Amino acid sequence: EVVLTQSPATLSLSAGERATLSCRASQSVGTYLAWYQQKPGQVPRLLINDASRRATGIPARFSGSGSGTGFTLTISSLQPEDSATYFCQWRSHWPPMSSFGRGTKLEI
Amino acid sequence: QVQLVQSGAAVEKPGASVKVSCEASGYTFNIYYVHWVRQAPGHGLEWMGMFDPSYRTTAYAPKFQGRLTVTGDMSATTVYMELSGLTSEDTAVYYCSRDIFGGDPENYRYNGLDVWGQGTAVTVSS
């Protein structure tokens, strides 16, 4: 089972700054990694799929990079509405399996 | 429009079972996998298991093996999640979601969990 480790656990930044969130996998997952944003009381929202592809309707300030065991979610020029918890998720095609990281709470 | 609609909140006693439904609409049901993810109060997202409507197969996280059963009703385009042996630690919001792999078999792309149900609150209390 792949374990995803996200860092930092909490990140406090100001509007207009850049945020860099890390997700490390215990073994290589290729590019089968996605990032989600979740605000309190809301359903998670897909931001990035296949490690670096923005999902439909996601603003260009969100970008993903990495492959293998190291991944990064970058939010350039933070907006107040970006305050949320961000999760990374790994998915195996075969055998089918998945898991989430513990999340990074971003405070603006 | 594409949506996943879940059944309503449930309150169960310790040791009981709970069954939550997830009805899919607006897309071709048998080409997307359906996953179950839960979130305990103040905690993160936890992947539980999944259903492949194309082959009617399932996969479960090791933590839930033997206690979780995911089934599907193809005619009703509905997936069910049943969790048995409930304890207070199973109190959580349970979500269903869908995903798919795009591209060619030689070069799959993971499209992510792009549509989510509204969530079902399950409370385990005596």
Image (spheres, grey):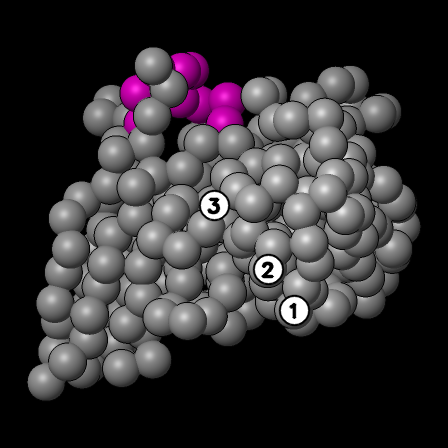
Where are the magenta residues, as a range? B24-32
Q: Nearer the viewer, mark 1 or mark 3?
A: 1
Crowding around mark 2 (Cα neighbors within 10 Å: few <14, some 14 to 19, many 20+) is some
Task: Report, in whole angstroms, how far the alpha carbon at label 3 lies from the one at label 2.
Answer: 17 Å
| Residue A107: mark | 2
In this view of the protein, can residue A96 be seen by the observer? no
Q: Which residue is depicted at the point 71% across and 35% down?
A: A62
Which image quadrant is residue A43 in? top left
Q: Quadrant of the C terminus of chain A?
A: bottom right
Residue type for callout 3: Pro
Looking at the picture, tell me which residue is in the foreground, B10 or A40.
A40
In the image, residue A25 sits, relative to residue B57, either above or below, namely below
* Residue at disc 2, secondary structure: strand
Question: Mark 1–mark 3 contact, CB under 8 Å?
Answer: no
Residue type for callout 1: Thr
* Residue at disc 3, secondary structure: loop
Q: Which residue is depicted at the point 22% across and 26% down?
A: B76
In this view of the protein, can residue A86 be seen by the observer? yes
Residue B124 image position (x, y, % from top left): 19, 75
* Residue at disc 1, secondary structure: strand
Chain under callout 3: A
Q: Nearer the viewer, mark 3 or mark 2?
A: 2
Q: Which residue is depicted at the point 37% across and 19% down?
A: B2
Looking at the picture, tell me which residue is in the foreground, B112 or B31.
B112
Question: Mark 1–mark 2 contact, CB under 8 Å?
Answer: yes
Crowding around mark 3 (Cα neighbors within 10 Å: few <14, some 14 to 19, many 20+) is many
The residue beneath circle 1 is: A10
Crowding around mark 1 (Cα neighbors within 10 Å: few <14, some 14 to 19, many 20+) is few
Residue A58 lies in the magenta stretch? no
Q: Nearer the viewer, mark 1 or mark 2?
A: 2
Residue B25 lies in the magenta stretch? yes
